[in-house]
Amino acid sequence: TAGITQAPTSQILAAGRSMTLRCTQDMRHNAMYWYRQDLGLGLRLIHYSNTAGTTGKGEVPDGYSVSRANTDDFPLTLASAVPSQTSVYFCASSDSPGQGHNEQFFGPGTRLTVL
Amino acid sequence: GQNIDQPTEMTATEGAIVQINCTYQTSGFNGLFWYQQHAGEAPTFLSYNVLDGLEEKGRFSSFLSRSKGYSYLLLKELQMKDSASYLCAVRDSNYQLIWGAGTKLIIKP
């Protein structure tokens, strides 16, 4: 199985432009997450979804939006990119977080540079 | 506030043992995770502790003391492929993971 995939692998984006980062999982996990990873900082949660049709804000949601129309897909949209959004973005999924240890599985990441 | 502390970088010798510490202060506790992340790759799950004590999995072990807000990851018989960053994460009262910045482990021959 593919597990969890992300697209694109990397992207250079002009400031002010919009972009959608795609994430798809085939593990039928209820929960999905978007993180950003910056040098010297831990993974920071942007948005999450505990089940299809619901989303929630994480630690750093400003400038980002998400949707969860179905179980498999969880796209992240930057409406108007700014240089501070330059980062590596990881999508992850897990079974319902309140049940058992249910580790998160990560996609390969998208390296985004905003100029 | 919520805080996860771990050393920034550690160096060890191939074949030796290394212990990576993690201390945490979080709003609630619903388990502690260790992940491994090789440079340029995604994090991958290593271990999970929710009760006090030691969990052993091959060359890797993880320890938890909830009263001290402390965990460590023990790596034995180090191999060059163990060169990676090791991330400590705590699941808080909202069942979200709070992540440390990671410890970069350098293995020397």
Image (tube, coloured by chain):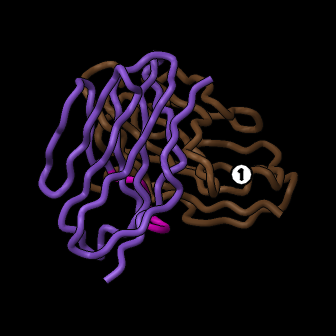
Which residue lies at the image location 31% right of the left edge and 83% below the top edge? B109
**Residue that carries the numbered disc 1 in the rendered image:** A19
Residue A43 image position (x, y, % from top left) = 55, 45
- For chain B, give the colour: purple
The letter of the brown chain is A
Which residue lies at the image location 66% right of the left edge and 56% below the top edge? A87
Residue B37 image position (x, y, % from top left) = 41, 59
Residue flagged by tag 1: what amino acid is it?
A: Met
For this orientation, the residue located farthest to the right is A16
Front residue of this view, candidates B102 and A31: B102
**Relative to B84, residue B67 above or below:** above
Q: Can residue A96 be seen at all in this image of the molecule? A: no
Residue A60 image position (x, y, % from top left) = 68, 34
Residue A103 image position (x, y, % from top left) = 31, 37
For this orientation, the residue located farthest to the bottom is B109
Category of crowding for the residue at label 1, using alpha-carbon neighbours closer than 10 angstroms: few (below 14), some (14–19), many (at least 20): some
**Relative to B88, residue A61 above or below:** above
Which secondary structure dominates the residues rendered in magenta?
loop
Which residue lies at the image location 67% right of the left edge and 60% below the top edge? A112
**Relative to A45, residue A19 above or below:** below
Q: Can residue B22 be seen at all in this image of the molecule? A: yes
Identify the image quadrant of the N terminus of chain B. top right
Report the side of B82 relative to A63 (left or right). left
Which residue lies at the image location 57% right of the left edge and 36% below the top edge? A45
Front residue of this view, candidates A102 and A2: A102
Magenta region, residue range: B39-44
